[in-house]
Image: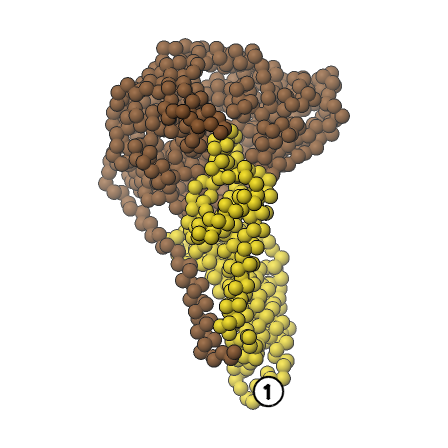
Chain colours: A yellow, B brown
Amino acid sequence: MGRYVVRRIIQAIPVILGATFLIYALVFLLPGDPITALAGEKRADPTVVAVLQERYHLNDPFFVQYWYYLSHLFTGDFGEDYRGNAVVDVMSAAFPYTINLALTALGIEMAVGVTAGVAAALKRGRFIDNVVMISTLMVISIPVFVIGFVLQLVLGVKLKTDYGIDFFPVSFNEEAGFRSYLMPAYVLASTSLAYVARLTRASLIEVMRADYVRTAVAKGLSPFRVVVRHGLRNALIPIVTFLGMDLGGLMGGAVITEGIFNIPGVGHQLFQSVYLRERTIVVGIVSALVLVYLFANLVVDLLYAVLDPRIRYE
Amino acid sequence: MRLTKTMRWTALAACTALAISACSTSGGKSATDQASGGSGKKGGSISVELGEPQHGLVPQNTAESEGSEVLNALFSGLVEYDNDTSVPKLRVAESIESPDATTWTIKLKDGYTFHNGEKVTAKSFVDAWNYGANQDNAQEALPFFDKILGSDELAPGKGKTPATKELKGLKVVDDKTFTVTLKAPFSQFKTMLGYNAFFPLPTAFFTDPKAFDDAPIGNGPFQMDGKWEHNKQIKVKRYENFPAAEGKAKLDTVTFKIYEKLETAYNDLRADTIQITDKLPVSAMATVASEFGDRYIYKPESGVGYIGFPIATNPAFANADVRKAISMAIDRESITKTIFSGTRKPADDFISPIIPGYRKGALGDVAKYDPAKAKALFTQAGGLPGNTMEIGYNADGGHKEWIEAVGNQLKANLGVEVTYKPFEKFGAILTALGDKAYSGAFRMAWSMDYPSAENYLRPIFSKVAIDNGSNYGGYVNEEFEALLAKADSAKTDEESLKLYQQADDVLIKDVPYIPIYTYMSSAAYTKTVKNVKVNAQGQMDLANVELA
């Protein structure tokens, strides 16, 4: 398995390089000049613009600019943005928030989604099943920002002003610690959670019909053991695949949630940087997100072996 | 290769541990240190709304509202503006005098110090201005120094290097006095000096300018409390050595909480997590008055919105009567009411209502909605070639709705075919107009740098502003130029104001742009604070805020 992991890591290198090139080129092709973007609503002084363009090599052809970037990158220098902040600092300030948010969301997704799915599968066609199916359908069809603003207003504002319960901060608040992540993480997880519940339900219903489950029941194993050890374990494979893919999606897709709850994370930073044409930051963040994707996929593949010992790696 | 069970679970645990350890945020515990003695009346701590500033917190490099909001708490300028009337009052300056509006003598008061203890002297100002005027330093506020003698040598233009580092027009006389010589008389110079480009800098700045970006050392009522935490917050605390007579801050600390969305800030205000916001989201406009009552501040601010015409590059718009007819065919009242739900007011002068020199209804017929007269004038003036017109706007600022409303009114009232050209952002229109690549009508807006009638005329409509300012229409009128020059060299404020108004009259006759609306500033605060005031630039006067 060691060789398998090493091979996967080596495969990741061209993917990362290709991704930086593509992103760099895409941001380069966006219309608009980063220096005038920085000036906002007023016209930047032409002399100042010229000095800054010179400083950041903005008048050079694309490949020259990319070469500057790449040669810095090889020395471990991610460069600086057009305001003079080091990209490494910007990224290390933003990533922890998003990782916390995404992992909390993933936790909620797993706990709530899988539980709801199992409950629905075991009570197929009964009341519980209907509740899960209808509520997940609703969550999937309501846009994320609507869920976000409604929860913020109800749990953040109303609960505090009308009932004096100050448990869910309206916006991200360092002092509130983990509580700050609960509401946004739930909002971020909501759509995936619904998919996880439906996927679990379908997968488990399928597995429960399998011969080995029938055997397990016939052996007289306890219903819990039958469902968890024999049923769910096998039903989890498609769910783990989904969750693995989703982790990267949660991190990259946090733009809306981070905006609503004012979390100073990667989504927020990425949105701002694309708007301001901060090439170096965009490329840095996206490359890091690609790494997260690759890593999550590797973990998923390794987890298959844990769930189903018949799967081996060469 | 076969995995043993323990190996598998160890691998899983290692992966999880790796992911979790990567994400411990710095648990920045910020206790609100209550009433730390001091001579402030009450003490206490509050939080207020802010957007992430664009640049480091250097006064000479800040030209946008978010950064200036913080700088106004951290710095005191030579003059400051009255919250209600916008009239300049002396602050750090003891006197600012000139016999001829060209040579100015500025004397400083005693008692002002920087937050690191250094005295605020004449040199603090001269050094700061020399720094800002030098193109090598690429400061945003560079154009503000171009009235001072010698500025061309410090900013010789693209590809050239400044030969000197000092403005010829600045001379330190002694610790408390310096003189400024301008290239030409400028009666509004004193008024300009409250703008943050003219704030002083301590010597510590020049040894490490980069450090200033996140932790500036000012001379104002508040000093930094820690560093700027990007995208999160900027904390400031009362500066205890601020001269008491000059309005020492009353609060112990103020936290500028940085928001991405105004809606979120407004919800935080309703939950009393922040105490003041000077920007309200449009979605709040319907309910804010009933929710906040007299803690809702609604007053005109400095912005003016226009429809502009590229007069110099497009002959179709060269006839003033055509522009006037277009102006008369626009129903400003209905646009401000229905589209902006009262957050804008119809414009009736080129000069903003908050500025001394504004005349109510000065635009007269030009701004009066009269479809019949508009149509008659439009036909008589020959209309537009092909009977079509294009209006460009930036799609990033919520302008689509009102521009299309204007277009519909022009279609209905003048019978012209109107098309729209959305630009991806404001900078894109400016570039297109600057390169003469776009020749349609366009949306434009201006908000003042300093409260003077002159600031609504020269930067937008004068000849010099074609290359270096905001005259995107390329409008030129010699009579207008002559009146501005005469007003600049006037001996008294009344005389200069009268002449600026005459220049304004020339614009009203020529209508190079058509003013559509003026912006209103809206702010709100919670029950926990009092004495909240917002100035004409829409900024909070934080030094006077107290806990209720």
* Residue sitting at x 50%, y 32%: A50
Residue nearest the viewer, comparing B16 with B453? B16
* Residue sitting at x 55%, y 63%: A11
- Horizontally, residue A191 falls left or right of residue A79, namely right
Q: In which quarter of the image is residue A219?
A: bottom right
Image mark count: 1
Q: Mark 1 lies on which chain?
A: A
- Horizontally, residue B366 falls left or right of residue B234, namely right
Residue nearest the viewer, comparing A288 with A248? A288
Q: How crowded is mark 1: few (under 14 residues within 10 Å), some or many (20 or more)?
A: few
Q: Quadrant of the C terminus of chain A?
A: bottom right
- Horizontally, residue A141 falls left or right of residue B467, namely right
Residue B122 on image: x %, y %: 30, 24
Is residue A168 in view from this perspective? no
Residue B227 on image: x %, y %: 35, 44
* Residue sitting at x 61%, y 78%: A207
Say above or below: B521 vs B188. Answer: below
Say above or below: B548 vs B438. Answer: below
Residue B32 on image: x %, y %: 31, 47
* Residue sitting at x 53%, y 66%: A8
Q: What residue type is labelled 1?
A: Thr
Say above or below: B464 vs B276. Answer: above
Residue B477 on image: x %, y %: 58, 14
Query: Which residue appears farthest toward the bottom when viewing the image?
Result: A219
Q: In which quarter of the image is residue B114?
A: top left
Please name the residue that numbered disc 1 is placed on.
A215
Q: What element carries label 1?
A: helix
Is residue B60 in view from this perspective? yes
Query: Which residue appears farthest toward the right when viewing the image?
Result: B386
